[in-house]
Amino acid sequence: MSFTPMIRQYLEIKEQYPDAILFFRLGDFYEMFFNDACVASRELEITLTGREGGTRERVPMCGVPYHAVDGYIARLIGKGYRVAICDQVEDPAEAKGIVKREVTRVITPGTIMEGQLLEEKKNNYLACVAQDENGYGLAVTDITTGSFMVCSFSGNRAKYAIMEEIARIMPAEVIVPLTGEKGHPSSSEGMYPGADSLALELKSLGTPVVSGYPNKAFSQAQALRLLEAQFGKNAFLNLATSSPKLAVSAAGALVSFLRDTQKRDLAHLNSIQFYQPGKYMLLDITTRRNLELSRSISDNTKKYTLLSILDYTVTSMGGRLIRNWIEQPLLIKEDVVARLDAVEEIVSNALTRQEYKNELKNIYDLERLAGRISFGTVNARDLIALRKSLAYLPSLKKLMSQSVAALLKKIGDDIDPMEEMKELLDNAIDDDPPLSLRDGGVIKKGYNSEVDSLRSVKLEARSMLAGLEERERSRTGIKSLKIGYNRVFGYYLEVTKSYLNMVPEEYRRRQTLANAERYITPELKEYEDHILGAEERLLQLENRLFNGIREQLLAQIRRIQCTALAVAGADALCSLAEASVAGRYVRPEIHGGGRLLIRDGRHPVLEKVLGPGLFVPNDTEMDQEQNRLVLITGPNMAGKSTYMRQVALIVLMAQLGSFVPASEAKIDLVDRIFTRIGASDDIAGGQSTFMVEMNECRSIVAAATAKSLIVLDEVGRGTSTYDGISIARALAEYIHLRIGAKTLFSTHYLELTDLDKIPGIVNLNVAVKEQGENIIFLRKVINGRADRSYGIHVAKLAGLPLEIINRATEVLRSLEAARDNTAQVAAAAEEKAVSCDRIENPVLEEIRQLDIFGMTPLEAIGKLYELQKKIDKINIQ
């Protein structure tokens, strides 16, 4: 098929990026052709036209203005597409034949730099997973901020662990290996054995995009070369991960992917952080969802989450950091105490707290400004934002350095005022620059003498044009004559049609309009060459100077990033302090020994929703001896789930370094929090509500330790009553006797309340007050067990028809009467059997007196042997 040279160029480039929509630069537009045009026109709601392409039929085409391209790209990325930006890489005026074009960047969900799709207070993570028979390597970056983290997972639970970590990070895109040889990102087809199942599992976590990448990028040799080039030869000397080779593979492939897609220097990715998830509290995806840490169950937003309660940050950097703290509570006591010391100091001094806030709120997003400087996408207004931010750093540093808390003092030490950068920007960048460099006026007067001289030429030329316009009006008598300019035709003399008979012969027509004609004269042409020549030289010079300033800033990018991290830390700590004051929280005492004590504990989110004074506080006391497993009974809607969630949230808040909603709290650090709350099914996965429940219970008993906190709500509801009771009882016994974790276990099965016969299991119930046929929920957790479930009362409150309520009451009375009669018959039979046993088998009395739970296994075996001998003796007699 014979295409025009331009279409052939397009097709050759498109062949290299088959799974991306190619934005092909033609003049002032980015054009799309063929199927890309059809897709883009539909998704962007723009007109689909056609273009001559050398074939019979016109080639489908659509386009967008290059100066507005970011908004269109953002819309496509938001719909799950990739976009390849193909730019002109030579001056069209100097080109011989077709202008040379190349793809200068591929934009994917994990590599977005544009602001339209980025949440200010949320990281946009790109992750990469390497896998072999021994485990997994994980590398994670946010190219907007320059963070780059690596870890690895090995052992029996490696797969479970990496899925939990990815669920915590919530990346916008995950890279996995492919067997293909092409260097561009590809779809999941053709993956190496096992990679397809990995991609499916990642998708099941809710990862928006899983992208395949050539397998060779994960090789050790290539990965090490890339990582040494990016981070330096010493970057991997202290690689403290369980599977170093996998960590290297994932990190190297991630750098390779970024270089392939971004096609530029990644100078702001200059340090690599190796971390062990074991330093932080592990929270599986179920627990994160149930506790609604940063996303609500109802609408998947920040509303009504713990993040919404604790986020008082005034900078974007601080907002991202406080989110990360909530998602990743600490496990090391010294780290927790250091944060609490800092928060306490800020809480105790309202004046200092306000001073911190006044300084912080004027600091822009230094992390993402650093990213744009590195990418070369920074504009003059970004540099003004940087300059304004630098102006507040000295006073913030001084405030922090005067602190007593060690963490606050360290933050003060880490803040670099960067006075020379501020001086450079003060002198070089105009105070009110345009958004685009092509508009000129970016460089400040007095910074460069040649810029000042060329601007003088422009001003003089404009004055000369005004004089020419006045002279031509007088000479020709055309009162409406005016001099104008546009980018296509340059400068012109415009004459309305009513004066066309007065136009001099030396005027040469340049453009015809509906109501006027535009002309050029030799004198105006001379001025045009003079002005446009000066403007072109000025724009080139301003661009060169601006890029030189960017290069100077790029050389100091690490200083900007370190200061950004310090400012984010200050903002996050101030946020926790502000939340503590607003919520009347107290500092928790962090101690060992297994004790958990909460006086007047409150649910932080529900308390704020209800308003001041309406939430009923409750106490909690647990330990590893007498109160390790707490059975909680009471009716639906009485507050059991709220009570259990609030305990979990208070522990989590303490371990992220926050004050807590209580009058007193003593917290022994837990390694994990597990929750099994509510009913849900997985229709797509073919799992019923009960199967989902059992899978969650399996995950808990497989991973929990004696240092964990477990919250179980109504286990066993999805099957028959006897099955449910049996499973719930067996699960409670297993957790208590085999695992030894502190556990809150709510149930409607009153048959389970006799578990309190086992040492360490206690009963609590949520109190209600009966008024005739009605009940009032007191929301108060008290000692003891509930004697009724009040299900029919709750149904009545829900508004079921009275006919149903009355019939349910009648059935309940009938069932209770039958149960009581059966119980009486069984009790009589048991008493008779016991009497016989006592007469016929005197050994039984000795068995009844045994302290089973106080015996060691060896003592129990010995006693059993002794009793067996006695029974044999009785039988012989």
Image (cartoon, grey):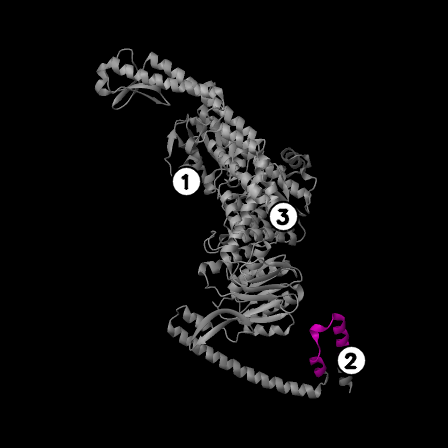
Which label number is shown at residue 768? none
Secondary element under disc 3, as helix, strand or loop, is: helix
Residue 599 position within the rendered picture, expressed as x and y whole percent measured from the top left: 56, 65
In the image, what residue type sits under mark 2?
Lys
Up/down of 447 relative to 869, above or below:
above
Mark 3 and mark 1: Cα distance apart in space: 53 Å
Up/down of 479 relative to 602, above or below:
above
> Is residue 559 on the magenta stretch?
no
Secondary element under disc 2, as helix, strand or loop, is: helix
- The image quarter in which residue 555 lies: top right
> Is residue 862 on the magenta stretch?
yes
Residue 282 position within the rendered picture, expressed as x and y whole percent measured from the top left: 61, 54
Q: Main secondary structure of the magenta part?
A: helix
In the image, what residue type sits under mark 1?
Glu
Q: Are marks 1 and 2 in contact (CB under 8 Å)?
A: no
Q: Are marks 3 and 2 in contact (CB under 8 Å)?
A: no
Secondary element under disc 1, as helix, strand or loop, is: helix
- The image quarter in which residue 703 lies: bottom right
- Kindly identify which residue carries mark 2: 869
Number of the front mark, 3 or 2: 3
Which label number is shown at residue 43? 1
Residue plotted at (38% across, 30% down): 50
Closest to the observer, 295 or 512: 295
- Disc nearer the start of the sequence (3/2): 3
Report the magenta residues as a range. Answer: 844-869
- Kindly identify which residue carries mark 3: 406
Closest to the observer, 276 or 576: 576
Mark 3 and mark 2: Cα distance apart in space: 69 Å
Number of the front mark, 3 or 1: 3
Give the crowd class for mark 1: few <14, some 14-19, many >=20 residues within 10 Å: few
